[in-house]
Every structure is written in C-alpha cells, then in structure tokens.
Amino acid sequence: MEVDGIGLRIKAALLRIKGIDIGSALMYFYLLALVRQMMWLVPNDIAAWICTVLLASIGWMIFLKYYDGFKGERKIKLGFVVMVIVPVTILFLIRLPFPDTSYDVLNYHLLEAQRSLAGTIMPRSDVDYNLLPNSLPDMILGIFRFFLGYRLGTIGNLLAIIWLAVELRNLLSKMFKNDQMISLSVLAILLCENIFYEINTYMIDLLALPLLVHLLNVLLEKEPKVSRSYKVVYMSFFGGLVIALKLTNIIFVVPILIVELFTQYRQGKLEILQVILMLPSLLIGLFPFHLFMWVKTGNPIFPFYNGLFHSPFWSSTNFKDLRWGPISNSEKVLWPIMANFLPNRISELAHYSGRLLLGILAIPLAVLTKKKHDSILPLSAIFIVSAVLWSISTGYIRYAIFLDILGGLLFIVTIDALYRLYFRSLLGIIMVFILIVGLQVQILSALDFSLSYNWSSNPTVFGNKVRFLEESRDILHDYDLTSFQSASNRHVLRTVGAWLDTSPLTSGIEIELKSDVPFAFLRGFRPPNGEMERFLMKNANKNIYTICMSSDFTGVQRTLEAYNLGVVSVRRFIVPYYSTYTKLNDLLIRVSSNKSVDRQYSYGAALPKAADRVSITAITPVPREVTHGQALELSFKVKNASNIAWPMAGDKRVDIGDHWLTGTGKVVIHDDGRGQLLKDLEPGKDQVIDLDIKTPEVPGKYILQVDMVQEGVRWFSDKGPAPFQTTIVVH
C-alpha cells in the first residue's frame, strides 16, 4: 500500500510537470535564484549549486501543486499567439542584436549578478558598500545570460512579458467571452512604452509584473481549488517574492493583500490563522537577502532608510533621488495626474504617453459601471491606493509600470461596461468612441517612443539595418567579454590583480572583463571599520587597476587621494563591448599605494601657452568632394612640438577637434567632432588619432580646420591659424 501511495504521488508530480506553462516554467528560475541566496552560507560553490538545484526542484513541485488551482486556462490558442505573443516578440527582436549598455546595468546590476551567483553578493575578498538592492532579479537574468550569452540573456524579460500576457488573458476571461476581444485588449494593455524601454536590457523592473497580475487573478478567483487559508499563504508568498524582486513593489503588494483580507472579512470567512500565516509566508522570499544585509551592515534594506537603521556603512539619511517625483506635499497629492504632463520629472528618458492618466479617468466611470463587472471596485481601490503610495514614495515612472498595466486594464474594462450600458444611446456611443480614440493615441505615442528610445540608447533594425545584421552574428557567441578585446587589452587584463571601482558606469565592465579578482568600491561612504585599509594592505603586492571615463578622471584622482593612493600609469582603454561596433571609450588606470607617484598626473590646471606648439598631418587621404551631411572617419598624425607634456585624461585633457568655415573664413560649424589621445603625449612624441567628422548640410565650398584643444581652456590656434586645413566641396 505504501509503495502504491508513493507511485501515485510520483504519477501526480509527472502529470503536473507535463502540464507546465510559460509561467510555471519561468517560476523555476525565480525559485532557483531565491534558493541560491539561501545557499550563500555554503562555502563550496559546486556544493552550493547542487543543493540549490535539488531544493529549488522540490520547491517548484510544491509550487506547481497550488499553482494549478489558480492559473486559469492552460491552453494558449493560436489567435492569442498571433495577436499578442508574436507582436511582443517582434518588439523584442528589433533591438536584440544591440548589446545593453544601460547606466544602471554597467553601474551595479552586472556586478550583483556575478557575485551573487558565484558566492555571496559581498564575498570576503571584496569591500563593496554600494547601492545594493536585492540581487534576486539580477540573478534570474544572470542565469539566462550564463546559458544564452549577453544578448539573448535578456530573453528572461521577454518570457516575463509573455507570462504577463497570459495572466492578463486569464483576468479578462473573467469579464469578456470573446477570444479576439480578449487578445486585442491584452495587446493594448501591454503597449505602454516603459515595458519596451527595458525588454532588451538587464534592468529588472519587468520580472515582477506577471506575479502582480497573477495576484490579481488569485484575488478575484471566486471558487479557488484550495482552502482560503492556503489562498492567503499562497498570495503572501507571491507578494514577498514580488517585493524581493524590487523593494518599491511593496506599494502594490500591500493594497492587494489588504483587499483580500477585507473581502474575506466582509464575507465572514476571515480567520485569525490566515492573518498569523501571512507574515512568515511573506518573508520567505525576503529573508535570505535582507537577513544577510542586516548581519553585514546593520540595515536589512541597506542603504535605504538608513536614517532609521543607522548603519555605519552609509550616511544616516533616507536615500531618495531628488531629481524625480513630487517636491511639495500638494504635488504628492496631485502627482499621478501631474506626472503625465511633466515627463522630464518622471525619468531620465523624459517621454511618457500618459497611461496613468487613462487609469485615473477610468476610476469615476468604473464606479458608475460597477454592476457590469464586479471586479471593477477592488481593482480601482488597488489602483488608487498604489498610485498614492507611489507619489509619496518616489514618483519615478519606472517604478510604476504595474500602474500602467492596471490603468490600461481598468480603462478597457470601463469602455466595455459603458458600451454595454449605453449602446442604445447616441451620447453613450460618442463617449465610448472618444475613450477608444484616447487609448489609440496613447498606444501610438507609446509605440513611437518605444521605437525611438530605450535605456541603452540603442537603435532598432529600422534605424540601422546594416549594423543590425552585423551585430546579429554575435548572438550566441557573446559569452565572454574578453574574447572581443584586442591582444593588447587581453595582455594587460592578465596582469590585473584587483579592481577598485572609482567612477560610475565601470563596475560592470570590470567584473565582466575579469571577475576572479578582489573588488573594492571606493566611491561613496567610507567604511568606518578600517575594512578598506585592510583590503588595500592585503592587495598591496598586486597590480591594482581602476577603469573610468576620461571626463571622470579628475574626480577619480580625488577619490584615490582620499585613500592615500597614487596613479602609476594611465592608458586609453577602448573596450569593444560584446561587439565590434559598440565601443566604450575609457581609461585604464594602474593604482599605487605610493601617493607621490601621482604628481605627474595633476590634470586640473590649464597648460601654459608654450604647450600650444603642434604639427598635424593627415594619415588617411582627405576627400576633396563629399556629400552634405556625410560622416567621415579621418586619421591624423599629431606631434607635440612643445616641451610640455599633454594630458590625455581629466576635465582639462588635450583632444583633437575640427571646425568648418566658408571660403571667406566665416565659421559655420564650430566644434564639430572630437578625437582623444591614446596616452599622454610627451614633448617631441607623436600619435595617430582618429577623428569622426560630419560635413555641413548645405552644399558649398568649405574649409575644414583641424586643431588641438585643451578642454575647458582654449583651442591651440586661438591666436593664430589652425595647424591643419584643407578645402572641401560639399555637394
């Protein structure tokens, strides 16, 4: 009998596996990353991963048992694939070949993923008290990146959006009967620009969206296949996982759980056991990372709200980016409306199609039509409370994508309800028509923004077909950044013994180029326990390097000086970033604990006029005739004819540039292009420098002048002729 019982359980488990859908499949990766955080205590990486896979598989089987009771319609019909999944996939594919270089990705997402998957987010070899949100979503996308390469690794976002689409279909199936209407509505809801700004990046805001809509499905499920206590536990676990994926998601989870408890209370079915079980269920997804951070820093949500926790590793302030969101209390009240008209204050991209406004407009209409859809009131309550909490907390639109989704859902459901109530009234038909036109305008604006912008500033296939095809060759061949580097880059990388992170946009580059060396974060709050000093002492006999942009060099010098460090050498470091097209123009700086070696790199001062002696010779032939608006890449041999070295870094570095003049000497384009020295140019030495220029848009006969410039100080030819000039006819 016991054997038969085990056999039945195995058979049931196999049937559950056979019936998995996109959501349950993706959920395995979520659990895999969560359990890997729990295994940070296991020192051996191989043993930790074996335990992770086994425990995640067990947890997944338990999840499938309860997920079956809530996931709704399993079968995805062909019409839904054609009308929803295919368009979303196309919007993903049109940018796929272009590698992600988003600010936050290079700043910390890649570092968090690598360290968290290989051990802990803060291994003993490192000193990193950076801005450290929960690394769970970075780990999920990092797993996809490990198996599929850098470009295809973002497919985790696409799968999350497809899962989101399925959850929206299940939700709308409770209100609509027509399959085509459901599919069209789902596509309309998904067409908000903030989804497609991120779908090809390693930004992590999209991963929680399907879980949040799944929570709405469970909330509105009238006849769940499990007990109400299990339902509360299930929703709380999902809610905790949503918060673990992004801390700001708490503003959505709390209203959803409150509505569930209130609904059960009104029905007289709320039990004290359900309330007791909520908290531990909620904490399952949160405790691995936040317990680790509490032990490590004294602040479980480090560095946020450190005014409350007073971790010694960060200033005792409540972190908030003051560039975004409402400023005054009155603005906080009105921000969900104001945000639609102030795109420059809701995100760096400064474009917004106004989906929030549609959700707000739907609320009063939804209340009037609540008899047609009994789900309108709870969804409206969640939208209102979440919008208020969003305004109070951040007001940053990237943290409100769920509000975009929920607002679109409410708007469409309201249109349907209005049509059912007033389809015989001319006024009602006009009102429905106006609302549909408003939705179409929002969708067209969102599509226009999505095709024009994303967080990496990458083009689409429509913007650069040739580069799209060339970059496509690297798909599934982009597992290792070092394989794209020149021989000289690979040679110097072999000598790197430790990294110092001293400027933005570089930790991801450093960790992708060489991850098996110690890493320390120097910019920001200085650890008070001497940990940084011990790191520097421990690695004093190694070659310590840092990477920065040229414009950040002066700030990097100040950061190094604060730790009594000096600069041994600086070299131009062109990093082909998983591509022969995408190149990051940085500096590679070797650092020494001997501050005295830094004297020759004091780049903050203007050079004397005696430094302005230069000889410039064209290496590539300069064309005599060109077309208007044509991009040209020219190479020049530059010789320092003075007795003063020219710096290649810092805010007062020496660059090469050009101007366009008419035949009579009138300047028509001042300061056209720029090229940079590969290293400091010593007296009497020369270098070959590339200069990208663009010809004037208006045809005519022009003089091209090429000159050297000390940035922020003067052009070398300010009081004399340019070192190089030639006449060019523009057609």
Image (spheres, helix red, strand yellow):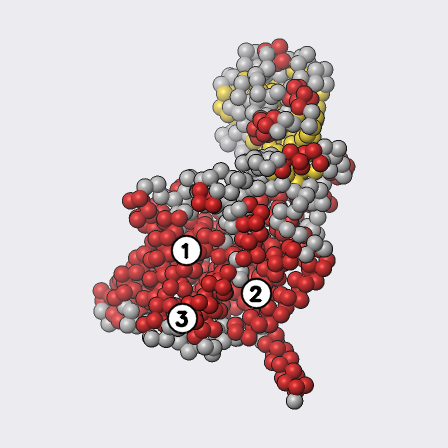
Q: Which mark is residue 178?
A: none
Is 623 or 366 nearer to us in this picture? 366
Rendered residue at 59%/11% (across/down) = 609
Tag 3 secondary structure: helix
Rendered residue at 33%/75% (across/down) = 267
Of the two numbered discs 1 and 2 in the rendering, the one whose residue sits closer to the viewer: 1
Spatial CA distance of label 1 from label 3 is: 24 Å
Q: Would you call the spot at circle 2 few (<14 residues within 10 Å), some (14-19), or many (20 or more)?
A: some
Q: In the drawing, does residue 555 fall left or right of residue 511?
A: left
Q: Do the numbered discs 1 and 2 sit on residues whose CB atoms are within 8 Å?
A: no
Q: Do the numbered discs 1 and 3 sit on residues whose CB atoms are within 8 Å?
A: no
Spatial CA distance of label 1 from label 2 is: 22 Å
- Identify which amino acid the numbered label 2 is placed on: Met
Q: Which of the image's four quarters has the C terminus?
A: top right
- Identify which amino acid the numbered label 3 is placed on: Ile
Is 542 or 384 nearer to us in this picture? 542
Of the two numbered discs 1 and 3 in the rendering, the one whose residue sits closer to the viewer: 3
Residue underneath mark 2: 27
Q: Which mark is residue 251?
A: 1
Residue 710, visible in the rendered structure: yes
Q: Specify the quadrant of the image occupied by residue 144.
A: bottom right
Q: Position of residue 171 (x, y in %)?
A: 42, 69
Q: Which of the image's four quarters has the N terminus?
A: bottom right
Is 698 or 661 nearer to us in this picture? 661
Rendered residue at 61%/58% (across/down) = 38
Tag 1 secondary structure: helix
Q: Would you call the spot at circle 3 few (<14 residues within 10 Å), some (14-19), or many (20 or more)?
A: few
Residue underneath mark 3: 272
Spatial CA distance of label 2 from label 3 is: 30 Å
Residue 582, visible in the rendered structure: no
